[in-house]
Image (tube, helix red, strand yellow):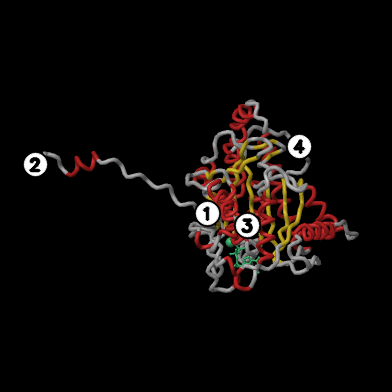
Amino acid sequence: DELGISLTDMAMMAPPAPVPPPRPSARQIVSIGTETDSYAFSFHEGELNAILSKVPPGWKVCVVSVVGAFRTGKSFLLSWFLRYLEAHCVRRGGGGSVGSDAAAAADDDGKRWFERVLTLNQHEGSFDWRGGKERNTTGMWMWSDPYFLPRPSRGDEVAVLLVDTQGMFDHETTVGLTAAIFGLSTLLSSYQIYNVDKRIQEDNLQQLALFSEYGRMAFEAEEKAAAMGISEGDGEDAGESEKETGDASSSYKKKVPGKQPFQKIEFLVRDWQNFDTEDETDIAAMEAEMAAYLEHVTAERAASDLKETRDQITSCFEDVSCFMMTHPGFGVIKNKYEGDVSKIEPLFMRLLDRYCQRVFNTDGIDGIPPLEPKTVRGRELSAVELASYIKSYALMFEE
Ligand code: GDP
Ligand code: MG
């Protein structure tokens, strides 16, 4: 008062308090059900755009998505993906220092990335994977922050996004909605993981054939609309992509457009019980068994309906593969499980480590093709293009 400064003046002089960046978390990009219509499909464009805006302009985006039945360990897997990415990325979009520090620390104490995680709950804001949670929400989630992975052979980096789905095949979600969620996640991903329990069953193949056909129909309808110039999204993108492909970036890859509309589908078999390999450290021998199993399952059969199912899948995806994980141990599936990593079976962790290396390999390892950016008709999409691409399909499913 004596100085003639009122409290309001002081408040105006004080520097604005820095707003801390929101904690990384899974953001819902599609939700099912409103107060009036429990089957309504809603797309949350703002959430998607907020994530994609964290990708630097012109960068390519890889989208890894996990689909499959309720309570088959999808979110648990994704929470491990996050830890792997935290330990191996160059940096995370949206702030926070991760990656190289964690990798360096790993070298210091001689431990692998997963051996340095003591409890899964330690890492706050992880994909909500804990057991005992009811399905109160159905839809699709995308991790709030892209992770940037190096591609040493090309000298560049790609952005990686993770997508989780909830509420498929749970007897409460209609076939139509399940098909829409499956179709949309297939359309937006460059690497689709189909999580299945214990083995690949004929009905898993039939569902995949049906839902990928649904995705393909949407894709073709949209392509037709774009060709006729009535798709706002694709029209705007043309200039953008011209700019990007023109920048002589050596990473730009133009694949010969295949006839398949989608890139990769991988069956991830959980709780596999039938490895013949007795040496529990011989992961390569187990991977040979996985390949042989897929070969056996997808071998052409005489019965024409089985053959049609397989043809349908191979005509939708450029690449079909299989990986298997064993049971994580009964300590993990107990209701009281607190995330203690020492309770997880060592073989599960070795397979998980190998699986993460395979999924997030950006340069190709052991003859396994590298993680690809999302492409449409053989052309890699930038974040801006991916946003309008996803939007156009999401709106189609909203109708
Ligand atoms: P989601 O509904 O598919 O996302 O499944 P969650 O990741 O939420 O996992 C459901 C329950 O299964 C939890 O209690 C997990 O601890 C447990 N779980 C996670 N991974 C596996 C697995 O590979 N096998 C088995 N049997 N249970 C698992
Ligand atoms: Mg889940």
Residue annotated with mark 1: 26
- The residue that appears at 65% across and 47% down in the rendered structure is 189
Residue 61 visible in the displayed image: yes
Dot in front, 2 or 3: 2
Ligand 2 visible in quadrant: bottom right
- Residue 256 or residue 31, whichever sits in front: 256
Residue annotated with mark 4: 257
Calculate the distance from the C-alpha at mark 3 to the C-alpha at mark 1: 21 Å
Q: Position of residue 195 (x, y in %)?
A: 68, 60
10 Å neighbourhood of mark 2: few (<14), some, or many (≥20)?
few
> Measured along the vertical axis of the image, is residue 288 above or below residue 9?
below
Calculate the distance from the C-alpha at mark 2 to the C-alpha at mark 4: 77 Å
From the viewer's perspective, tell me whether residue 134 is left or right of residue 188.
left
User: In which image quadrant can residue 68 be found?
Assistant: bottom right
User: In which image quadrant can residue 271 be found?
Assistant: bottom right
Image quadrant occupied by the N terminus: top left
N-terminal of the pair, mark 2 or mark 4, is 2
